[in-house]
Image: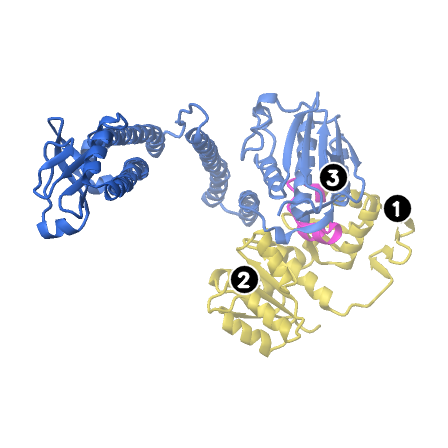
Chain colours: A blue, B yellow
Amino acid sequence: MRLADCLRQPSRLWGASIAAKLVLGYGLLGTISIAVVSVVFYTGTIGVLDQNLDGKIVAQAQRLLHRANADGHAHLIEEVRRLLADGIDSDREIFQLLDSEGNTLAGNLGSWPQAEDETEASTRPQMISADVVREGHLKPARLYLRPLDGGGMLIVGRDLSEQEAVRELIWDALLAGAGVSLLLTVAGALLFRRTIENKLGEIRGTAARIEAGDLSHRIAISGDDEFARLNRDINRMLDRIELLMEGIRHVSNAIAHDLRTPLSRIRGRLDDALRHEASVERLAGASHDAIDDIDDLIRLFERLLQIAEVESGMRTSMFERLDLGRVVADIGEMYEASAEDDNITLSVDAPESLYVDGDRNLLASAIASLLENAIKYAGPGSVVRIRAGLHHGMAAIAVSDNGPGIPAEELDKVTQRFYRLDKSRHLPGNGLGLSIVAATATAHGGRLALEDNAPGLVARLVLPLAGSQLS
Amino acid sequence: MEKRVRCLVIEDEAETSNYICKGLREAGYLVTACATGPDGLDYAIAEEWDIIILDRMLPGRIDGLSIVDKLRALGKHTPVIIVSALSTIDARVTGLRGGADDYLPKPFAFSELLARVEALLRRSAPGADSTQLQVADLKLDLRTMRVTRGAKVITLQPREYRLLEYLMRNENQVVTRTMLLESVWDYHFDPQTNVIDVQISRLRAKVDKDFPVMLIHTLRGVGYRMGATAPGDSDGGERALG
């Protein structure tokens, strides 16, 4: 928004832009502080001068009169002349002695103001500011008019022209200072506004592109200021969103494929059974096969639902304190026969009293999944070990094998839903096992780490020990 | 003939209700069905039942869980199986904590339901507290944990012993893989491989091998049954297919 636009539409200026508000706010703040400084400075200089001046003039007049009373009129004239000639402060001092007719007896004024009220002037002294002619020039002055007892008047005063000059100088300086600082405030605020708008423009531009569907766009980050930090946070959030979106796309594709295949198989089988001469056995056989296939589909759905449930955050109130060693021993024992049948040596090393807070069945299912994977993918003749124990202050279950393992570049992909290595596509499975294990680990405040066992794979499920779970 | 089992089915979805009732009647049960929460509660309280099968989500403001709740509050210990489309771990745990005896997620095979119903009925029946189980010539001494078939002593691992004990206690009844996992191993999850089948075949190798009569029978797609007669010989096989 240009300044001109702002001025044309005041409501936009006030309502729409934080920067505009800041400009106005700082401008106002600047003006007020300048005014305060000026007032303080002015009263501290000119004000003090003004106040002291009147006192000095009156004191000087009193002193003069004191001498005149003692020594008579002639003395007063003489004293005035002496004071004017003494060279002390004589360029500012004003003395004028008048007789009762108003004629000058002594003094340095060419003209002087007349008392406005004759009767009053003759009886009362007064302090006035007026212009007088002195040394041929009209000059501002502060005058004390003191009527004398025997008629006539004494005028004592100060030439203010110098003081006026100072006052004017101060005023000019203050005005110039105010003007410059106001200008700087406004300019600074405008600059600030432009910087903010530039920075926000980048964020808004990115937001617009993401809204339009380009999830890969990120905000450019420069420096390490507040905006850079905010942008980094936003970029991190976008990374996460992109990852999730990619996951959803991947899952939808996988579901579309993985469900279509068994569904078309079921359909084909039933269709085939109906179209040909249908004996009871034939129909029964087709029904059985169809039910088996549908059961597989239901199992697939159950697994997907389970991932969704575990990922959306388990209620930790459902957790119980349990001995992980016991669970590992149970599941290890459960799979010993299966491993033996596949000509795999399974060794179980599970000391008791490894307590964690968690869902016993979910953890058992996760351990079973890891074992099933190891037995299935390590292949006949290999050795599978499952160990429970402490690992860097946490409870850990490590399932290791000496089979073909997983290529390093695919290690972090295998926990994605439906992800299957190309070489294992011929084996039964749905590519959900490790996703559930990873989700289960996360739900328990732990994680699943897959590492190279050189040769083979180590899958390590790490969980917080009982009592150390973050609430 | 022994007294027929009285069974109450509370299920609002007509087709599922028919499917359950038909199956139970074929299994020889006396079945009463109702379709709403309030009706279900009235029936459940007013009459004596041997078992109640109820849907968790019911129309009419009273859901399955509150029926169980009221029933238990009245001191009735009628076995209750909840069948529900809510299959999450949370839903199962709240169902079981709420006083239900078993929880079966939909969709389910009728054979699974029937197996669970029969298991519950046996559990609630005052059984003879015997010290020995016997199926045909297979004997299991509960005190000495000695297993013999005919004259041959059979040596079993602890888990195999518990598996055999469970099968023998449920003689001539269908037991599913999930039931075995829950009762013998005390876990509730769905193994992706045939780990239970492998355990059974181990046991079978020790119990049935070298004997003319098979005692442990596999029911395809359902589970297992222990008995001197093969599944096809009695009503068991047909019934299990649902």
Q: Nearer the viewer, mark 3 or mark 2?
A: 2
Residue type at mark 2 is: Arg
Q: Relative to residue A142, is residue A189 drawn left or right?
A: right
Please give the label number shown on residue B56: 2
Please check whether the numbered discs 2 and 1 fall on a single chain: yes
Q: Which residues are magenta?
A: B177-196
- Does any portion of residue A326 appear in the rendered image? yes
Task: Name which residue type carries label 1.
Answer: Thr
Element type at marker 2?
loop
> Is the C-beta separation of discs 3 and 2 under 8 Å?
no
Q: Nearer the viewer, residue B180 or A134?
A: A134
Q: Secondary structure at mark 1?
A: loop
Q: Residue under circle 3?
A: A335
**Disc ID at residue B155:** 1
Within the image, what quadrant is residue A405 found in? top right
Tags 2 and 1 touching, CB below 8 Å:
no
Image quarter of residue A47: top left
- Distance in Å between CA atoms under marks 2 and 1: 45 Å
Task: Report in which chain the residue with disc 2 lies.
Answer: B
The percent position of residue A266, horizontal first and vertical second, equals: 50, 42
Question: Which marked residue is nearer to the observer: mark 2 or mark 1?
Answer: 2
Residue A32 in the image: above or below residue A426 = below
Tell me if residue B239 comes above or below residue B153 in the rendering: below
Kind of residue at disc 3:
Tyr
